[in-house]
Image: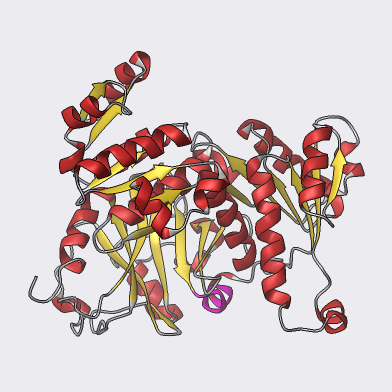
Amino acid sequence: MIGVQIARELIAEKRDVVLIEKDPETVKVVANELDCMVLLEDGSRPEVLRKAGAAKADWFLALTGSDEVNIVACGLVAAESRAVRTVARVENTFYSSLSAIQKKAFGLDVIVNPVTAAADAVVSIVEEGFAEDVIPLHDGRLQMRYLSASGIPSFVGRTLRDTRAAVDKEFLVAAAIRGGVLNIPSGEYWVEPEDFLYILGTPDVLDEVLGPIAGIQQSARKVLIIGATRIGERLVERLRERERQRSKGLGAFFRSIVRPARHITVLETDRDAGKRLSRTYQGTEVITGDSSEEGILEKSGAGKADLVVCATESQTFNILTAQLVKTLGAGKSVAIALNDRYKSLSANLGIDAMVSVKSVVAATVLALIRRAHIRTIHAFFEDDVEIVELAVANESSVAGKRLKNITLPKDVLLGFALQGENVVVPTGNTVLAGGDVVAFIVRKGSIAGLERIFGEMHGG
């Protein structure tokens, strides 16, 4: 599932991809769907890897469901060529703790753990501050809000350029949805009442222009995690780790007054799994029970929780439960999804956030592969459009240039720039410097063009 998603993304970015899969039915489906070479073979066999030309690739990605198969395949490819960079998907935390020397011995350049990546994604949005239809970016210093144009009458019946001039604030309409079709709007885009807009800016500016969002920075002191799964356990670990980091250097008495300790409760159907988690993370409350049974969620304190994370193995159950806890009074709810099946419905589900394991892992791998260190910070479900960002290298040929003197690919819209601690909505006169982080709204097919421009170095 993750391999197909990454292959689809890479093909959309006009890269050459060879996919190896040993299941005949999967190969039949994938060969019809993807414009790439698909081999019906076992990717852990040396002769198959040679047939696929793995040693001549820029990157070799081992993404099967077996940690051992992925590690062995990476080792075989690394033994054939030192030039190819290898990525292994692993789920056992033992492999994630390997040192750089140990990774090199196994032929591993990068290890990606889906469980860790998903847990980190949840912790990140919790720390940044989030709410329904609000996407936090860069530790909450930026926000993107999704709302109907009819709810902001001052935008309707005029161009975006006229609206910006009238409001005289720095914000950006990153995308406009009309009739289910996503547009990357220019300043001449005429806003209609039926449009839905994605509006990007700093929280204070968006509060002024659109009105404040209640509870977005609500501190999650009472947390309920439903499911002692690997993601649930890792989330407990990450939340406790963040709590320790935050309180480091403060006296216990002072901490208790200024910031009460975070209380974490885990609701799990399996008694043995609950006991194991309780022993591993002492101080974490574990309740044994089935959240689908009447009264169990109330007993576990879901209605009084600041945050409920639904992390069972079933994504449909997680989504339904995340909706249910909101009706019981939970401050915020997050659903863990395995894939993007329900992403197009996320705006109408009534939950605060949905984290897709597949999307998180795909974004991690793509950020590694893209030459200009381009990473996706948001993917729009309506179309093949993303918000990506990149850091300008000191030796880049664009460093020192004004944005208006840089020819950008078609279908690319400037989003924002981070210059030191300052967040700015850039203009054509903005001068880029080494270390600046610049974001673009871009169609996937134009990402390779950004790589060519921003990945190029002086003299290269």
Q: For the C terminus, which image quadrant?
A: bottom left
Name the residue located 29 percent from the left edge and 53 percent from the top edge.
369
Q: Main secondary structure of the magenta part?
A: helix
Name the residue located 67 percent from the left edge and 41 percent from the top edge.
311
**Looking at the picture, how far across and down is residue 384, in whole percent?**
33, 45
Name the residue located 54 percent from the left edge and 37 percent from the top edge.
338
Q: Is residue 289 part of the magenta span, yes or no?
A: no
State the extent of the magenta-drawn residues as a range: 202-208
Q: Look at the image and tell me whether residue 63 can be seen.
A: no
**Looking at the picture, how far across and down is residue 163, in whole percent?**
40, 72
Name the residue located 68 percent from the left edge and 64 percent from the top edge.
241
Q: Is residue 203 part of the magenta span, yes or no?
A: yes
| On screen, residue 187 above or below 321 | below
Residue 395 picture quarter: bottom left
| On screen, residue 275 above or below 250 | above
**Looking at the picture, how far across and down is residue 23, in whole percent?**
37, 17
| On screen, residue 26 above or below 60 | above
